[in-house]
Image (cartoon, rainbow, N blue to C red):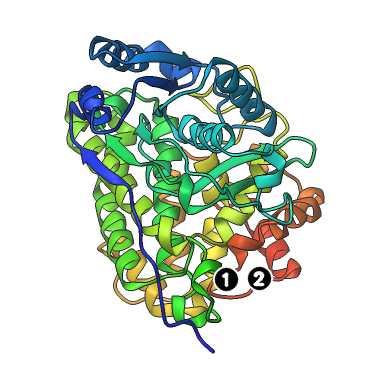
Amino acid sequence: MSETVFTYASPALKFGPGASAEIAFDLSQYDVRRVLLVTDPGVAVTGHPGRIAEQMSAAGLDVTTYDRVHVEPTDASIEEAVAAAREAGPFDAIVAVGGGSSIDTAKAVNLLTTNEGELFEYLNAPVGDGRAPTMPLLPLVAVPTTTGTGSESTTICVLDVLSLKVKTGISHPRLRPTLAVVDPDLAFTQPAMVTAAAGMDILCHALESYTARWYSEFDAKAPEQRVPYCGANPIADMWSEKALSMLSGAMRVAVRDGGLESSRPAREQMAMAATFAGLGFGNAGVHIPHANAYPVAGRVRDFRPEGYPEAEAIVPHGMAVSLTAPAAFGFTFEAAPERHLHAAKLLDPSVSNGDAHTLPEVLRTLMRDIGFPSGLAEVGYLDADVDDLVSGSLKQTRLLATAPREAAADDLAGIFRGSMENW
């Protein structure tokens, strides 16, 4: 029997320049006295977390700041954050100020300071046990400082499992933030490559959710068995389409003009597109490019992109996602040609008719224009790595199940090999 029901949920949302100055008021709507503010060292240097902490303190709240979040969180970094929160707590609410790394770390801290058990038990199967929380979580206010991850809207926490050299996550509706406070001014001066990588993450969120398997193509489930990622559906489509159309005119300007005043409208468009895409994929789900991104990021050797911490190798999440996206969407085209072509037209209004190559070419052109690496080879991967990359991707069963076309090991290998050089 086919599924006849789809679900939709989202956090409360506050959007606009200056919105981050109102968090003390927002928390006054809850019974809150002690607050944990979670951020990373790079964001802390901008002064935004300190200002928000001072404003909360001035309103009578007792604020503790944890500013050691690891960019691209690992199981070790999250366990460190959880241990610090357990020692300093208990808290009545959590405020995450930063990119997806800070927000995802805050989600894990929220889960593991309110529920029994350890991190590994809650990781998605087959990497972890897929345990569900049984106790309510604290109010979580998510304040993104990058325009891309959409983590302020979703039920997902993503991390690297160091021993396995793969990314995985925790997925449960209770992880969704209570309130998303999106202040475009916070991302105004982010480096160009951070803007580019975060922007491609937005784009892939929207594209993957829009091309995901339709919700009624899944088998029917009992209410308690339904997962947050329910497949493409009419409401998620609305958010994804709007995000794509906004990106078509904003991303190149936001990357090119950086912190120039002339880029402010484009920056606001990017922030809005990130939020819209999060509202879409946070319900419909993502698929092959995100499944591939986890081993690409998890097995990095020595690639160090401009604008990111220089002390360690990293393939930023949005970059890891998008490097295999052209080949992935070429592979999924036959499952829904009209959707792939419509998405291409939203990203590039000059597109008229097309075929399986159209959307991949639109993506490659955009990636070239924003200064991205040309493919997996440029970030350090060889043909000899493909088997390991495929193995890591196959572990992302939750994501691959959402793909509109089933991807077997040989299919994924073809996508990885086809992504070694995108141009």
Estimate the x, y position of residue 365 in percent, counting from the top left: 42, 52
Question: Eyeballing the image, is 59 above or below 401?
Answer: above
Residue name at image x 65 percent, y 32 percent? 74
Q: Is residue 348 visible?
A: no
Please count the marks in the image.
2
Q: What SS does tag 1 mark?
A: helix
Viewed as shown, does residue 200 lie left or right of 119?
A: left
The quadrant holding residue 9 is bottom left
Question: Eyeballing the image, is 170 above or below 144?
Answer: below
Residue name at image x 43 percent, y 42 percent? 151
Question: Eyeballing the image, is 244 above or below 148?
Answer: below
User: In terms of depth relative to the viewer, which is nearer, 284 or 356?
Assistant: 284
State if disc 2 and disc 1 touch (CB < 8 Å).
yes
Give neighbour class at mark 2: few <14, some 14-19, many 20+ (Cα, 10 Å): some
**Cα distance in 3D space between marks 1 and 2:** 9 Å
User: In terms of depth relative to the viewer, which is nearer, 174 or 14?
Assistant: 174
Residue bearing the label numbered 2: 407
Residue bearing the label numbered 1: 331
Viewed as shown, does residue 56 lie left or right of 324?
A: left
User: Amino acid type of disc 1?
Assistant: Phe
Question: Eyeballing the image, is 159 above or below 69?
Answer: below
Q: What SS does tag 2 mark?
A: loop
Viewed as shown, does residue 115 lie left or right of 75?
A: left
Question: What quarter of the picture does the N terminus occupy?
Answer: bottom right
Estimate the x, y position of residue 50 in percent, counting from the top left: 35, 12
Estimate the x, y position of residue 109 in percent, counting from the top left: 54, 31
Estimate the x, y position of residue 363 in percent, counting from the top left: 44, 56
Q: Residue furthest bottom?
A: 1
User: Amino acid type of disc 2?
Assistant: Ala
User: In terms of depth relative to the viewer, which is nearer, 422 or 60?
Assistant: 60
